[in-house]
């Protein structure tokens, strides 16, 4: 029962992470419209190689252990530094992809993405943690 519940919480967390990162890309595009990325008519209107880096965030987060039971519902003080390091590593992946595929990308866009993603991912994690605790207290998720 506990393993299934942990897997469910990890899946919901990954989905929330994916949504917050995607919103961060769109927000960075909106906040930095004069960037040098080509407009291809896509939702965030970015280079497809950069859009392909969105799922890479989940891989980086997994590599940092952010979906393990140990860190999913851990205290805020211990998870946030690990989460911040994972966001920085994900930004580094974007920079490497941009360099590897010769994507002309403005540094300001990367900074805006970093700030917005950091705020949204941390907020998403805190909301999930709070919601899970409330559901546990109401016994909606079964016995702990």
Image (cartoon, rainbow, N blue to C red):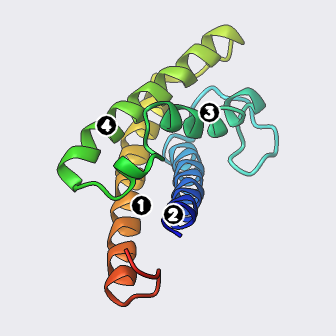
Q: Is residue 93 left or right of residue 124?
A: right
Name the residue that disc number 1 marks.
124
Q: Is residue 47 left or right of residue 4?
A: right
**Residue beneath the point at 62% across and 17% down:** 98
In the image, residue 107 lies at what x, y percent?
46, 23
* Of labels 3 and 2, the one closer to you: 2
Q: Is residue 22 above or below residue 132?
A: above
Compare marks 3 and 2 and give the one earlier in the sequence. Answer: 2
Tell me how far mark 3 sits from mark 4, CA to CA: 17 Å
Residue 17: image location, x then y, percent: 52, 52
Residue depicted at x 34% and y 59%: 73
Question: In the displayed structure, does residue 25 sit left or right of residue 130?
Answer: right
Mark 1 and mark 3: span between their CA atoms?
18 Å
Q: CA distance from mark 4 to mark 2?
A: 18 Å
Q: Secondary structure at mark 3?
A: helix
Alpha carbon of mark 4 to alpha carbon of mark 1: how far?
A: 15 Å
Residue at image location 65% in from the left, 32% down from the top: 53
Q: CA distance from mark 3 to mark 2?
A: 20 Å
Q: Earlier in the sequence, mark 1 or mark 3?
A: 3
| Mark positioned earlier in the residue sequence (3 or 4) | 3
Q: Which residue is mark 2?
A: 9
Q: Quadrant of the C terminus?
A: bottom left
Closer to viewer: mark 4 or mark 2: 2
Looking at marks 4 and 2 on the same chain, the residue that comes earlier in the sequence is marked by 2
Viewer-nearest residue: 66 or 142 = 142
The residue beneath circle 3 is 56
- Residue picked out by circle 4: 82
Measured from the top left, where is residue 136 in percent x and y? 36, 80
- Callout 4: SS: helix
């Amino acid at each position: 029962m506990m393993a299934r519940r942990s897997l469910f919480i990890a899946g919901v967390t990954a989905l929330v992470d994916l949504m917050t990162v995607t919103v961060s890309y769109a927000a960075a595009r909106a906040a930095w419209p004069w960037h040098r990325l080509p407009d291809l008519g896509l939702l965030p209107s970015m280079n497809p190689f950069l859009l392909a880096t969105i799922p890479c965030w989940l891989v980086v987060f997994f590599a940092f252990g952010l979906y393990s039971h140990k860190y999913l519902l851990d205290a805020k003080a211990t998870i946030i530094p690990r989460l911040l390091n994972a966001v920085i590593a994900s930004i580094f992946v974007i920079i490497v992809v941009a360099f590897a595929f010769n994507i002309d990308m403005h540094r300001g866009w990367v900074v805006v993405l970093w700030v917005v993603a950091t705020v949204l991912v941390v907020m998403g994690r805190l909301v999930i943690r709070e919601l899970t605790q409330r559901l546990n207290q109401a016994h909606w998720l079964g016995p702990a």
